Image (cartoon, helix red, strand yellow):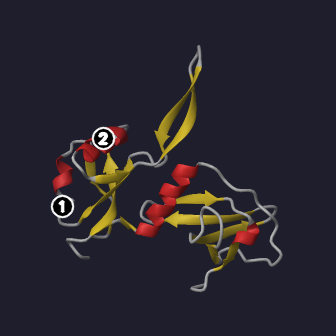
Amino acid sequence: METNRKCWIVGYTLPQCERTLQVKLQRSGVECFLPMRQETRNWTDRQKTVDVPVFPNYIFIRTTMAKRFELLSNRELVKYVTFGDAPATVRDDEMALLQLVQHNKTDTAIVPQHHRLQPGTRVTINTGKFAGAKGMLIREDDHNKVVIELAAVRHLIKLHVDACQVSPDDRG
């Protein structure tokens, strides 16, 4: 892997330190992304909606392979996620999709598809706000679901899209 080319790598943080690390990295000019979701917490006297990380203890950092070790001086960053000896990287198109999902925070309606695709078929979304995204059809029953997998963190993002927006991916 090229050491001077920037790429997205996956950092593993101390528990509940994701936001602190995000602020530190941004203040030092390092591009990072921390996907958040809203969750309702219940106390005995009230309910409150709070933002929590989508992937607890994970943060996405855009840096060069050569400079990634300098960032470990932040106490909140424990290590980088690795597979074998190589750091887990996330492709730019996967990050763009993750950021788009985070920004839109909505799903589109689902329409039954005229031709049936088999589960496991790689598909491309052709139109709409997720146009160009590639994923895997996980099931087709009353609803078609396109799943984009971020292999670097072994999590799935389920996108609900109109069936007419989906076509088989040429790469199979």
Seen at 59% across and 48% down, the residue is 105
Q: Residues within 10 Å of mark 2 (few under 14, many from 20)?
A: few
Q: Is residue 1 left or right of residue 91?
A: left
In the rendered image, residue 25, in percent from the top left (x then y), is placed at 26, 47
| Helix, strand or loop at mark 1 | loop
Marking on residue 81: none
Q: Quadrant of the C terminus?
A: bottom right
Amino acid type of the residue that numbered disc 2 sits on in the rendered structure: Val
Q: CA distance from mark 1 to mark 2?
A: 18 Å
Residue annotated with mark 1: 67
In the rendered image, residue 35, in percent from the top left (x then y), is placed at 46, 48
Instruction: Determine which quarter of the picture holds residue 132.
Output: bottom right
Instruction: Determine which quarter of the picture holds residue 114.
Output: bottom right
Q: Residues within 10 Å of mark 1 (few under 14, many from 20)?
A: few
Seen in the picture, residue 82 relative to 126 is either above or below; the reply is above
In the rendered image, residue 108, in percent from the top left (x then y), is placed at 70, 56
Amino acid type of the residue that numbered disc 1 sits on in the rendered structure: Lys
Mark 1 or mark 2: name the one nearer the start of the chain: 2
Q: Quadrant of the N terminus?
A: bottom left
- Which residue lies most toward the top here? 45
Residue annotated with mark 2: 23
Towards the viewer: 57 or 52 = 52
Seen at 29% across and 43% down, the residue is 21
Q: Is residue 39 left or right of residue 110?
A: left
Seen in the picture, residue 110 relative to 133 is either above or below; the reply is above
Observer able to see residue 11: yes
